């Protein structure tokens, strides 16, 4: 019997930070909470810096201001779902109402 369970997949996407104050603590927390719900390894890349999307300190270290283009890469069985959900979260301004 052949099973494709556990097959590693890769996905990548870009999003632009649209929040007026950039990725400060509250939107970064939303991003990390969302990313942490997936088994895939997820990384964010900004200006030559790479951080783990499941690390609040890492995401804050990016100092991503409004207009920053963020490249996201994920690897794991749920990588595509992770990337889609995180892009959707970014499009909703990380659930920030301002």
Image (cartoon, rainbow, N blue to C red):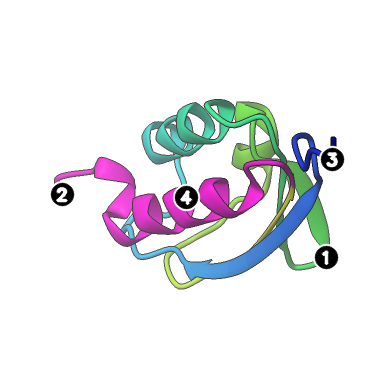
Residue 66 in picture, x, y percent from top left: 42, 65
Question: Which element type, helix, strand or loop, lies under badge 4?
Answer: helix
- Who comes first in sequence, dot 3 or dot 4? 3
Image point 58% across, 31% down: which residue?
A: 38
Q: Nearer the viewer, residue 91 or 2?
A: 2
Image point 46% across, 34% down: which residue?
A: 34
- Decide whether residue 11 is among the magenta residues: no
For label 4, the crowd category at 10 Å Cα-Cα, with few meaning under 14, some 14 to 19 and many 20 or more, is many
Q: Nearer the viewer, mark 1 or mark 4?
A: 4
Residue 70 visible? no
Residue 25 in picture, x, y percent from top left: 45, 32
Residue 41 in picture, x, y percent from top left: 75, 39
In the picture, which quadrant includes the N terminus? top right
Q: Main secondary structure of the magenta part?
A: helix
Q: Identify the disc placed on residue 98.
A: 2
Residue 53 in picture, x, y percent from top left: 65, 39
- Decide whether residue 82 is among the magenta residues: yes
Highlighted range, magenta: 76-97
- Who comes first in sequence, dot 1 or dot 4? 1
Residue 59 image-quadrant placement: top right
Residue assigned mark 3:
2
For label 3, the crowd category at 10 Å Cα-Cα, with few meaning under 14, some 14 to 19 and many 20 or more, is few
Residue 84 visible? yes
State the CA–CA distance, disc 1 to disc 4.
Answer: 20 Å
Question: Which element type, helix, strand or loop, lies under badge 2?
Answer: loop
Residue assigned mark 4:
86
For label 2, the crowd category at 10 Å Cα-Cα, with few meaning under 14, some 14 to 19 and many 20 or more, is few
State the CA–CA distance, disc 3 to disc 4.
Answer: 31 Å
């Amino acid at each position: 019997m052949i099973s494709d369970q556990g097959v590693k997949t890769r996905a990548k996407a870009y999003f632009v930070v649209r929040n007026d104050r950039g990725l400060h603590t509250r939107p970064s927390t939303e991003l990390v909470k969302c990313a942490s719900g997936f088994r895939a390894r997820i990384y964010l890349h900004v200006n030559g810096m790479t951080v783990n999307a499941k690390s609040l300190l890492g995401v804050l270290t990016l100092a991503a201001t409004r207009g920053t283009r963020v490249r996201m890469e994920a690897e794991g069985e749920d990588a595509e779902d992770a990337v889609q959900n995180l892009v959707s979260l970014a499009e909703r301004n990380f659930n920030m109402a301002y």
